Amino acid sequence: MATTGKSEVMEALARMISEVMGEDDLGIEAATSFKDGLEFHSIQFVALAELIQERYDEVDFVSWFSGKELSEIMALRVGDVADFITSQRAGSRAPA
């Protein structure tokens, strides 16, 4: 059974973030901060959430994200989102 590892999710997230920001070659890594590194705005999180839900429909990113306190959102790094997606995808493939 094929699985999607964190590195593949990171690549997909980097493409989605570039699409949302309208810029290429942002040098996105796991440690890249949405607040300080990318200077993401709330509307950009909404657009990114839509792209994540389209690609990973088995992952409830919106609930995970909306359950966070403002301080947690401000501290989010791209790797945190990749970890969440990877863990949720692994859980959705667990045998019944």
Image (cartoon, grey):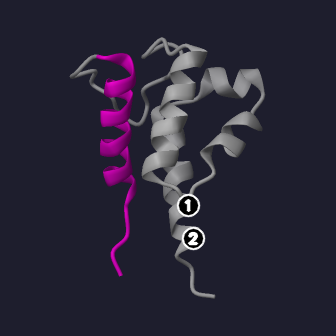
Which element is circle 1 on? Answer: loop
> Residue at the location (54% across, 16% down)?
35
Image location (x, y in percent) of residue 65: 67, 37
Residue 20, magenta (yes or no): yes
Residue 58 shows which numbered tag?
1
Quarter that holds the N terminus: bottom left
Mark 2 lies on residue: 92
> Residue at the location (73% across, 35% down)?
66
Image location (x, y in percent) of residue 50: 52, 37
Of helix, strand and loop, which mostly describes the magenta segment? helix
**Between 60 and 95, which is closer to the camera in this rendering?**
60
Image location (x, y in percent) of residue 39: 48, 11
Q: Earlier in the sequence, mark 2 or mark 1?
A: 1
Q: What's under tag 1, amino acid-wise?
A: Glu
Which element is circle 2 on? Answer: helix
* Magenta segment boundaries in residue numbering: 1-22
With 1 as the anchor, is 43 left or right in this view? Answer: right
